Amino acid sequence: MGDPKPHILSGAYRAVWRWHFYAGLLVLPVLCLMALTGALYLFKDEIDAAVYRPYERIEAGQQWASPDRWTAAASVGVGGRVINVRVPDRPDRAVRLTVRRPDGEQRTAFVNPYDSQYLGAVRYGGVTEIVKQTHSLAIIGPWANLLVEIVAGWALILVATGVFLWWPRKREAGVLTVRATPPSARPFWRDVHAVTGLYAGAVIAFLVVTGMPWSAVWGDRVLGLIRETGSGRPPAPAAASPWIHAEHDDHPAGVGWTMEGAALHGGPDSSHGAGGLATVLAAVEAETLPRPFTVTIPTDPSLAYTVAREVKQVEDTRTLYIGADGGLRADIRYDQFGLGAKAFEWGIAVHQGTQYGWINRYIMLGGCIAVWLLAISGVMMWWKRRPPSLSHRRLGAPTAPPGPRVRAAVLGVVLPLAIIYPMTGASLIVALALDRLARLIRSRTAIRA
C-alpha cells in the first residue's frame, strides 16, 4: 500500500508495510479458502434443500408411524445404529436420521414418517458438511485448530497494520473513494485495496474473532475463563444431576457451543428398550418444543436423550433433557446462560448470518467477497511494483528500516495481538527468526559479491 516514494516514507510506515506484506503472504491464501467456504455456508439451508430434494420431499399424510419404526428402517437401510433424529417442521418433509456404521462412517438417512419407508441415504451432512469441514480446515487433520488460531491472529494483524497504512497523513486522494485512474495503473489497485479494507475491515475482524470459539489454545483458555467465572452454561437442575461430559459417541447434536458435550443422567428408569424414542417424542410434544429439532439417542443407557431446537436467533435457543421413561430432567434456555456464553452464542449466530435475517447474511457475504477483493488487489499492487528479477531471494517486500523507534511502532501494532493469540505469538517468533536469517544470508551474499 501507499503511493509516496520510498525515500519520503517514514521508517515506521515502511516497517509496518513490511509486516503487512508478510502477513498477507502468509495467510491470504488460507483466508481466501475460508472466505469462499464461509460464503457458501451462509446458504446452507438452500444448498441442503437442493441436495436433499430427491430424498426429502414426500406427500403429507395424516398420522405418523411410531418413531421407533423410523430408526429401525434407517438402521436396516444403512446398516448401522441411529445416533440422532431430526424432526422436520413441515408435513411434506422426511425425517433425517444420522446413522453410524460399524466402521465408524456416518450417513444421513431419510425416512417417510407416515409409513416408515426408507427413502435413501447420503454422505453425512451432504455437501454443506464438506464445506464446513473445509472452512474449519478440519480436512487437514488434528492440527486444524492450531492453524485456524494462527491464521486468525495474522488476519487481525493484517487489519491492524492496514488501518495504520490507510491513515490519510495529509493525503486526500484514494482515502474514502477510488480515484478515476485506469485499472492498468498501480494507484487504481492501491485505492481498491485501501478503500475495500476501510469499509470491510471491521466485518472481517468480526468474522475472525467470532470464528474462534473452537480454536485449540485461545478457545480453550477463554472457555475455561468463562466456566471459572460462572458466566457459561447454567448449573444442572438440582432434581437432575451434575453435568456429565459426554463421550464422543454421545455428544449431543445441535446444542450449540455452550452446551456442547453436556449430558445428564437419564433418571431411575434408564432402559432404552422398545418405545424409547416414541416415549421421548411424546414428552417433547407435551413440552411444546417448536420444530424442527434434533433428538440425540445416547449409546450409554444411563444418559438422558438430548433434544435441541434448531434456531436462527439465539434468543430462541432451548434444549430438553428427557429420560427414556419420558421424564423431563432439564429444560435449558438462552436466558439461563451466563454473560460469556450469551456473547459467544450471539457472535456465532451473527457469524453464520442468521441472527438478524437477510441483512445479516449479506453483510457477512460482503466480508467474504472483500477478502477476495483485498487479495486480488494486493497481488496486482505487488505485480506492478515487483523487483525486476525474482531470482535473487527477493519477493519485493519493503526494506526493513533500522532503529528502536521503528521496532516499537511495529510491536505496538503486532505485539498485543500476539499476546491475545498465543499460537500467533509463537508463529511471530518463528517469522522474526526467519526474517533475520534471510537478511543475514542476503548481507553475506552481497559482501561476497
Image (spheres, rainbow, N blue to C red):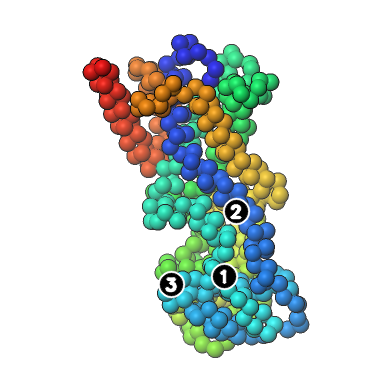
Residue position marked by numbered label 2 in the rendering: 41
Q: Quadrant of residue 377?
A: top right
The label shown at residue 122 is 1
Q: Is residue 386 left or right of residue 61?
A: left
Residue drawn at (49%, 38%) of the image: 28
Between the residue at mark 1 and the residue at mark 3, the CA separation in whole angstroms equals 15 Å
Residue drawn at (43%, 77%) of the image: 102
Query: Which element carries disc 1, helix, strand or loop?
Result: strand
Q: Earlier in the sequence, mark 1 or mark 3?
A: 3
Between the residue at mark 2 and the residue at mark 3, the CA separation in whole angstroms equals 25 Å
Q: Earlier in the sequence, mark 1 or mark 2?
A: 2
**Amino acid on which the number 3 mark rests in the picture:** Gly
Residue drawn at (27%, 25%) of the image: 441
Q: Position of residue 47 (x, y in %)?
A: 65, 59
Of 275 and 327, the residue lying toward us: 275
Of 420 and 226, the residue lying toward us: 420
Q: Is residue 40 left or right of residue 419?
A: right
Query: Which element carries disc 2, helix, strand or loop?
Result: helix
Q: Earlier in the sequence, mark 2 or mark 3?
A: 2
**Amino acid on which the number 2 mark rests in the picture:** Tyr
